[in-house]
Amino acid sequence: MSALIEPEQLAHETELVWLEDINTLDYVRQSLERLPTRRGKPAYHRDGRMVGYALLGPEARSSRASGTFLRRVFWLLPHDRDGQPDGLYASGAPSEAIDPRTVAPGVKGYKTQRSEGGPPSDAMRELGITLPKG
């Protein structure tokens, strides 16, 4: 889950590689994966598709126990909003989702009004609360 990613886990990211145009996506899911290398396109073994991934700098150290590196991977499932606009996530977003326009190397990213699926609620408008538009 995005909320469980700590900033120090992203400290050695040098670049994010996007496999798709993120401007067309309201949100992407992000997770930390144990991968055998610092760089290069990782293997993907989920339903859905990988949308992007992080590259690590040479100072990133592998785990002593497994020899793997923690790298961020961005992905979508078949039932996500881009594939099913009127489906489960027509409004709201999965817990690990972030607006891809809010992320950068070393920056976790966050949900926005756009990633949450739409206009602010009446209560938000009454209180003058707005989420970032990304």
Image: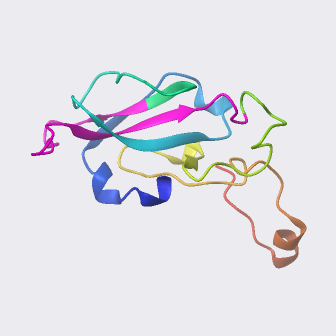
In the rendered view, does 65 fall on the left or right side of 130?
left
Residue at the image point whose x is 34% and y is 24% from the top: 42
Q: Residue furthest bottom?
A: 127
Q: Quadrant of residue 126?
A: bottom right
In this rendering, the answer to whether 132 lies above or below 75 is below
In the rendered view, does 98 fall on the left or right side of 85?
left
* Residue 86 position in % (x across, y down): 85, 36
* Residue 36 position in % (x across, y down): 22, 29
In this rendering, the answer to whether 118 lies above or below 52 is below
Q: Residue furthest left?
A: 64
* Residue 63 position in % (x across, y down): 15, 45
Q: How is the image coloured?
A: rainbow
Quick one: 92 or 54, which is closer to the camera?
92
> Residues in magenta?
53-81
Residue 60 among those drawn in magenta: yes
* Residue 107 position in % (x across, y down): 41, 51
Residue at the image point whose x is 80% and y is 37% from the top: 87
Numbered circles on residues, count: 0
Residue at the image point whose x is 81% and y is 70% from the top: 124
Residue 104 among those drawn in magenta: no
In the rendered view, does 60 fall on the left or right side of 77?
left
